[in-house]
Amino acid sequence: MAAEKHILFEVDEGVGVVTLNRPDRLNAINWELGADLVELLRGLRERDEVRVIVLTGAGRGFCSGGDAEWLSGSGDRGLPGLSDVPLERYQRKTPAGPVADVTRWLVEVDKPVIAALCGPVMGAGLAFALACDRRFADPTTRMCAAMVRLGFAPDCGITWLLPRITRLSTALMMVETGRILEAEEAHREGLIDELVEPGQALPAAMEYAKRLAAGPSVAVDLARRFIYKSLTSTLEEMIDYEAVAATLSSHTADAREGTRAFVEKRKPKFEGR
C-alpha cells in the first residue's frame, strides 16, 4: 500500500481502495487532502485496471467534515471572511476549492464508487458518502449535515444529493438543524444502503465492489453515467441516450462474450474490454 500524503491507495482484484488517512483528526478534510483526492480521482478515471472504487477512512471514522483549523481561518490557507490570508483566484470563485471538487469527481470518475463507513460521516464527509453509488456502514456510523452547526450554509453538493437520496422533509431537517442521525435512523431514511455488523463495512463494500469489477465494466460504467443523466433529462431523451449506450457497449469484447455465454448456457468471463 502506497501513501500519497493524506491518502492511502491500493488495487485489489480490480478494486481501487481509497483511504482517507488522517485518523488523528477523524479524517477531517482540509485543502491539501481535498487537492490530493481530486488529483487521485482524476487519474483513476483513465486507469483501466481499476474498474470500481471503494472510498473509506482510516481509524474510527470515515470523515468528520472540514478541518477545524482551516474552517476557523487560523491556518495557512485562507477562508473568505474568516482570515486575512490572500486568496487565489480559484478560491475566490469557489471558497471550498478542491474540497467541493471532490464531490464532482466522485461522479466524474465515471466508475462505480462504493463507500465503506463507520464513525463520523459529517459535513463534507457526508457529501462525499452520498456522492458514492452505494453506502455500507456499521452501527458506529453517525451522519450529519454539520455546516449549519458552525454557521455555514451547505456546500460540497449536499443540497443536490440529500433530496435525491432521502425524503425532502428529512433533507430539509438535516441542512436546517444539523441534527446527528445515528446509524439505524440513517438506514431507515435511505442514507445507508447496507447496515452491517460492527467492523464489517469495508469487507462488505469490498465484496460488492469485486462483484462489479468482475462484470462487463464498460456496460456498467455507461449504465452509471446514464442514471446520472436521467436526473436532468426527459424520458424521450433517455431512450435516445440509451440507444447510444447500447450501440457503444455492443462493440465490446464483453458483449460478445456475454451473448456467447448465454447461448452456450455457461457463466461469462468478462475482461472489461
Image (tube, grey):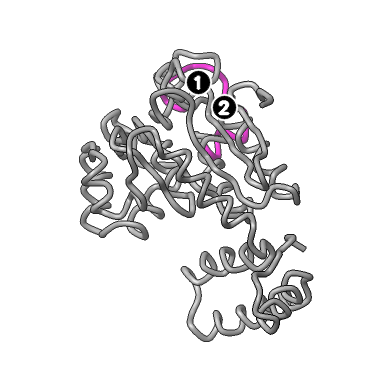
Residue 33, which numbered label? Answer: 2
- Residue closest to the eye, 206 or 53: 206
Indicate whether residue 181 is drawn in magenta.
Answer: no
- Residue extent of the magenta highlight: 80-94
Q: Main secondary structure of the magenta part?
A: loop
Q: Is residue 215 visible?
A: yes
Which percent across, then down, holds residue 13? 66, 45
Residue at position x 58%, y 50% from top? 210
Check the picture and name the quadrant holding the N terminus.
Answer: top right
Earlier along the polypeptide chain: callout 1 or callout 2? 1
Mark 1: which amino acid? Arg
The residue where tag 1 is placed is 22
Side of 89 relative to 133 (left or right): right
> Is 37 positioned to the left or the right of 84 in the image?
right
Location of residue 155 with respect to 134 vertically, above or below:
above
Image coords of residue 125 (percent x, y) = 42, 36
**Quick one: quadrant of the C terminus?**
bottom right
Q: Secondary structure at mark 2?
A: helix
Q: Is there a contact, CB below 8 Å, between mark 1 and mark 2?
A: yes
- Residue at (44% x, 23% y) in the render: 59
Tell me, yes or no, whether the highlighted magenta stretch contains residue 85: yes
Q: Which mark is residue 200?
A: none
Q: Residue at x 53, y 17 (%)?
A: 85
The residue carrying pointer 2 sits among few (fewer than 14), some (14 to 19) or many (20 or more) residues within 10 Å by Cα, namely many
Q: Which corner quadrant of the image does residue 37 belong to?
A: top right
